[in-house]
Image (cartoon, helix red, strand yellow):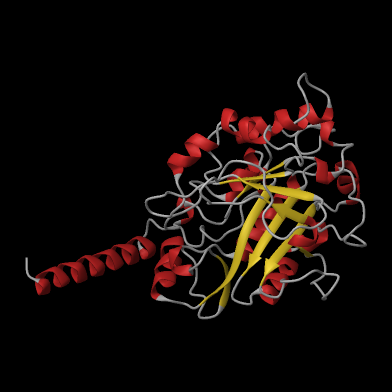
Amino acid sequence: MGCLQAIGCLLCLAVLAVAGVLAWRYGPWYEDGTATEAAPPDTLAALGACEGCCNLLASNCDRPVNEVLFPAVHNAMSSYDDLFAGANNNRPLEEALVAGYRGLMLDSCICDGSIGETLQNLIKGEDDKGENYLGFCHGSCDAGVRDPAQVLRNVKTFLDVNPNEVLILEFEVTDNSLEQLFNAIDDSGLDEYIYRPSATDAEWPTMQTLIDTGARALVFAHGDGMDQSCTATNCPEGIMYTFDHFEQTEWNGEAAPTGCDVIGTEREAQSFFLMNHWKNSEDTGLPSEDNAEVYNTYDKLMERFTSCTERIPTVLAVDFWSIGDVLSFTEEVNQRNAGVVAGEKI
């Protein structure tokens, strides 16, 4: 086949794809607006929630929040269900919260209204947002983007519906999107749940205290506009600089995801220890479901946790959250460390 014929075929396929999208979007079978509506509250009720529990376990309640293990979703906005290319997860973050995950790692960015974004908006039934609008994306909005207004509203609804659950949100801020992110958090109403410490070195409250005071969202950020300690700059109200409080393991290195070595400059131990527990495909560099099927298992998680002799992780971040034993492993770790089940503390 000649080059001109090949190019012609590709153009025809592109035109047919766009026509198909338009027909599906504007056909009589399409329910207008359903893709951008907030999730109904009854769909966000946490599985396993119980009276007198804190993050699904009564034994968590009297423990400081920085001593409880939080299972977290890496690049939580990125899922194949949400039409991301090379996604980090199969299913949306809202389903992860319902299942039992209590940490969300999200990237904020500014989208430019490209053709790729326009097609995504059509497929999702979302209105054209124009140019320079806030999105939750990873690298490029063309590869996939979630609407922050919808995501944050759903997170707020989750907290409304589940009064005994505490969340950790960690944002990587890109494209100088901090101001827009701050405004989106306020507009969603989520700010009413945000925990605001009096100082960066204050002792962390217990889970029960956070629940009793209604401050059930711990919000951290790093990146553009959040690139140094809040003791040295004015951080937006309610958003803490991640590395004032977190240290973390390596990710995607040759040895990852193994070991508990802390990356970054040497300093005093921080309150939270993030274990980055995922590995991209060595062939494509993209998130790997095959690797998740290996590393999200109980045995691999236990093997790695028991190698941590100096610090025990308090946030466990994974890709493809719906695969493996992450939640049952987290439950066992928290019960062991609270002394309510047999076995050594981890």
The one nearer the camera, 38 or 296, is: 296
Q: Is residue 98 left or right of residue 19?
A: right
Quarter of the image with the N terminus is: bottom left
**Snapshot quadrant of residue 329:** top right
Determine whether 229 is above or below 71 in the image: below
Task: Please count the marks in the image.
Answer: 0
Residue nearest the viewer, comparing 32 with 130 = 130
Residue at x 69% of width, y 51% of height: 262
Residue under the image location 25 percent in, 68 percent down:
14
Name the quadrant of the C terminus. Answer: top right
220 to the left or right of 276: right
Counting from the top left corner in percent of width and height, residue 318 is at 58, 45
Instruction: Report whether residue 222 is seen.
Output: yes
Name the spot of residue 163 as percent of width and height, x first. Answer: 80, 44
Image x and y of residue 202, in percent: 92, 56
Q: Position of residue 210 (x, y in %)?
A: 87, 48
Query: Would residue 42 be seen by someone viewing this image from the given angle?
Result: no
Residues 4 and 314: in front is: 314
Report the residue at 48% width, 68% height from top: 140
Most extreme residue toward the bottom, as rendered?
131
205, 157: nearer the viewer: 205
Above or below for 134 versus 104: below
**Corner quadrant of residue 150:** bottom right
Outermost residue toward the top in this view? 342
Residue most extreme to the left: 1
Q: Quadrant of residue 285?
A: bottom left
Report the side of 22 relative to 59 (left or right).
left
